[in-house]
Image (tube, rainbow, N blue to C red):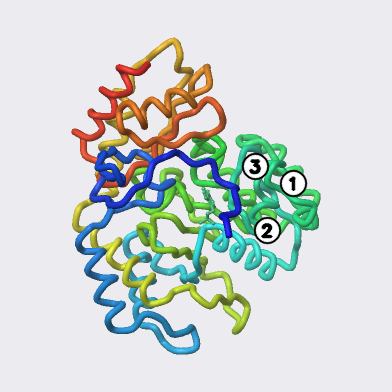
């Protein structure tokens, strides 16, 4: 049997990794400014993380959500305290798309409505509901068209209000910063306007923080730069540093009903050991502050060039927007200078490194980047 061939692959085979470095099967060492797509939050194979998962596995690896798992309660307490959402509750699942799916479902249960407003250039995942609110016709199948979704332009408050006024809107869903769509910041003022509109029209504001959350932008969640408190916040990626895990934070106005949401693997022991270890390291090593400091350094020091239209982002979520396609530059960074980077569309290099990236490693990238452009 062969693999279903849906991924474009680079011919690199990582066999080990530590911190922000990856080693391949030929012994070459790479600087990781991609983090497996914003997943590696505390760095590869952190000793605290490795120990926590190994020890947990030797005790108990899995049971089900029909029994009490105090690690879930501890995680809820710790995320609440670190993010400032102590009064919210946590539902645990397995991925970003599943978190968005649960958020959309919950908003619909709560309001009794079925329409959703999403934004142009959004990406929310690959399950049916998550794809339906993603603005990319290439990944939408006819099956997704059963959902009632209206796409508005990011920043167009009047357009959003007109849709809300038309009625039936359960939720507005937006990323804290659009990732796959090209590091587009919604703007603090616009987020505050969405928050106000949702309250006025009785809709739920869902903040997809799957990519932009968990410290990446220099605050625990990207929307916290705008000072708002959305109805539901969705998480994934960095929450367990690569162990599959997701979750949603739910405002106190939502009432839990038995059986309303559920999952087999969500909140399992290994994921909880991984997620608690991640929080321990984030706190002990001040990684949210580090993301802010090193991100500011990168934003200031990425060199200007006639080839570059704009450098934008917050913390360690940065897009370098070129006037020209970047595929060759990205290959040269990887194979010529041994630096992993991400991409958005044809023209953007996207940086999503582990939150422990040091200033020296950031400088190393800038030096490599300068020589290539
Ligand atoms: N939401 C955002 C903003 C994402 O960037 C992604 C993945 O890239 C997802 C949701 C989907 O997450 P997952 O692939 O874990 O389902």
Of all residues, the one furthest to the bottom in this rendering is 67
Residue beneath label 2, please? 129
Judged left or right of residue 228, residue 284 is left
Give the mark toward the camera: 2 or 3. Answer: 2
Say above or below: 86 vs 170. below
Give the image location of residue 184, x and y in percent.
Answer: 52, 34
> Sequence-wise, which precedes: disc 2 or disc 1?
2
Query: Residue 339 location, x and y as percent?
Result: 32, 33
Q: Nearer the viewer, residue 178 or 52?
A: 52
Q: Residue at x 46, y 58 (%)?
A: 236
Mark 2: few/some/many CA within 10 Å (<14, 14-19, 20+): many
Residue at 67% of width from left, 42% of height from top? Answer: 135
Q: Is residue 258 visible?
A: yes
Label disc, if present, on residue 150 of the rendered structure: 1
Residue at the spot x=67%, y=41% of the render? 136
* Disc 2 C-beta below 8 A from ligand 1: no
- In the picture, the quarter occupied by the N terminus is bottom right
Give the secondary structure at mark 1.
Answer: strand
- Circle 2: element type: helix
Tell me what residue is drawn at x 45 percent, y 89 percent. Answer: 67
Tell which circle, 2 or 3, labels the residue nearer the N-terminal end.
3
Residue 204, percent across and down? 62, 58
Contact between labelled residues 1 and 2, with CB atoms less than 8 Å apart: no
Residue matched to label 3 = 119
Relative side of 160 to 100, left or right: right
């Amino acid at each position: 049997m062969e693999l279903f061939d849906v991924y474009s692959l680079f011919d690199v085979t990582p066999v080990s990794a530590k911190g922000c470095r990856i080693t391949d099967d030929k012994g070459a060492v790479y600087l990781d400014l991609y983090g497996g797509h914003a997943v590696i939050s505390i760095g590869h194979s952190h000793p605290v993380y490795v120990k926590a998962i190994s020890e947990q596995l030797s005790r108990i690896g899995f049971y089900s959500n029909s029994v009490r798992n105090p690690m879930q309660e501890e995680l809820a307490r710790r995320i609440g305290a670190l993010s400032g959402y102590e009064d919210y509750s946590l539902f645990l699942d397995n991925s970003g798309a599943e978190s968005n799916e649960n958020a959309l479902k919950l908003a619909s249960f709560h309001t009794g409505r079925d329409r959703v407003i999403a934004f142009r250039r959004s990406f929310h995942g690959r399950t049916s509901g998550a794809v339906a609110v993603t603005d990319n016709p290439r990944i939408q199948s006819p099956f997704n068209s059963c959902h009632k979704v209206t796409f508005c332009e990011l920043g167009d408050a009047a357009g959003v209000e007109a849709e809300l006024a038309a009625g039936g809107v359960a939720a507005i869903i937006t990323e804290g910063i659009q990732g796959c769509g090209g590091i587009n910041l919604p703007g603090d003022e616009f987020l505050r306007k969405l928050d106000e509109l949702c309250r006025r029209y009785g809709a739920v504001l869902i903040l997809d923080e799957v990519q932009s959350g968990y410290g990446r932008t220099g605050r625990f969640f990207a929307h916290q730069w705008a000072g708002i408190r959305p109805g539901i916040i969705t998480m994934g990626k960095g929450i367990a540093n690569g162990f599959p895990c997701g979750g949603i934070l739910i405002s106190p106005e939502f009432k839990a009903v038995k059986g309303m949401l559920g999952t087999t693997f969500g909140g399992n022991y290994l994921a909880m050991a991984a997620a608690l270890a991640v929080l321990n390291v984030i706190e002990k090593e001040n990684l949210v502050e580090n993301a802010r400091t090193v991100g500011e350094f990168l934003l200031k020091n990425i060199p200007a060039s006639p080839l570059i239209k704009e450098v934008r982002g917050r913390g360690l979520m940065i897009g370098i927007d070129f006037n020209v396609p970047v595929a060759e530059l990205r290959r040269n960074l990887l194979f010529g200078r041994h630096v992993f980077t991400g991409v958005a569309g044809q023209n953007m290099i996207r940086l999503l490194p582990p939150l422990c990236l040091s200033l020296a490693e950031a400088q190393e990238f800038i030096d490599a980047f300068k020589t290539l452009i």
